[in-house]
Image: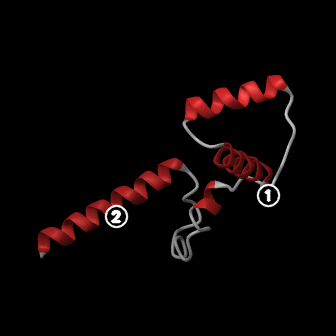
Amino acid sequence: MLSIQLDPETEAYLTEILSAEKTTSSELLKRLIYEHWLSLKPRQTLIERRGGHPQHLLQDAPSNLSLRENRKKAVSEYIKQRHQKIQSE
């Protein structure tokens, strides 16, 4: 149980928020505390949100794939080989 004293201005703000969002003060307070708690946590990187770095993704890849033209060539060759494999089946 939480009991707080609000000044009249803050209480008026609370009343407006509750009527606009059609919620109770208890639910609003829970949501605000949760949102604030989330804001205190360090943000996850995209890699962390996706579950980490893929394992064994580039284990057989040549070391020069960091250059765009090399990646484009590698993808093009892969697509050609895959297309030929599908046609031969």
Q: Position of residue 89 (x, y in %)?
A: 12, 76
The residue located at (60%, 68%) in the rendering is 53
Q: Residues within 10 Å of mark 1 (few under 14, many from 20)?
A: few
Q: Where is 47 relative to 8, above or below?
A: below
Q: Secondary structure at mark 1?
A: loop
Q: Quadrant of residue 13?
A: top right
Viewer-side residue, 53 vs 64: 53
Q: Amino acid at mark 1?
A: Met
Q: Quadrant of residue 49?
A: bottom right
Q: What is the spatial separation of the Cα atoms under label 1 and label 2, in whole angstroms?
A: 63 Å
Q: Secondary structure at mark 2?
A: helix
Viewer-side residue, 18 vs 84: 18
Residue hosting label 2? 78
The residue located at (52%, 48%) in the rendering is 68
Q: Amino acid at mark 2?
A: Tyr
Q: Where is 34 relative to 4, above or below?
A: below
Q: Position of residue 25 (x, y in %)?
A: 68, 43
- Relative placement, left or right, of 63 versus 41 is left
Q: Where is 49 relative to 88, above or below?
A: above
- Relative placement, left or right, of 68 versus 2 is left
Task: Identify the mark nearer the N-term, 1 or 2.
Answer: 1
Residue hosting label 1? 1
- Relative placement, left or right, of 26 versus 86 is right
In the rendered image, the quadrant that contains the N terminus is bottom right
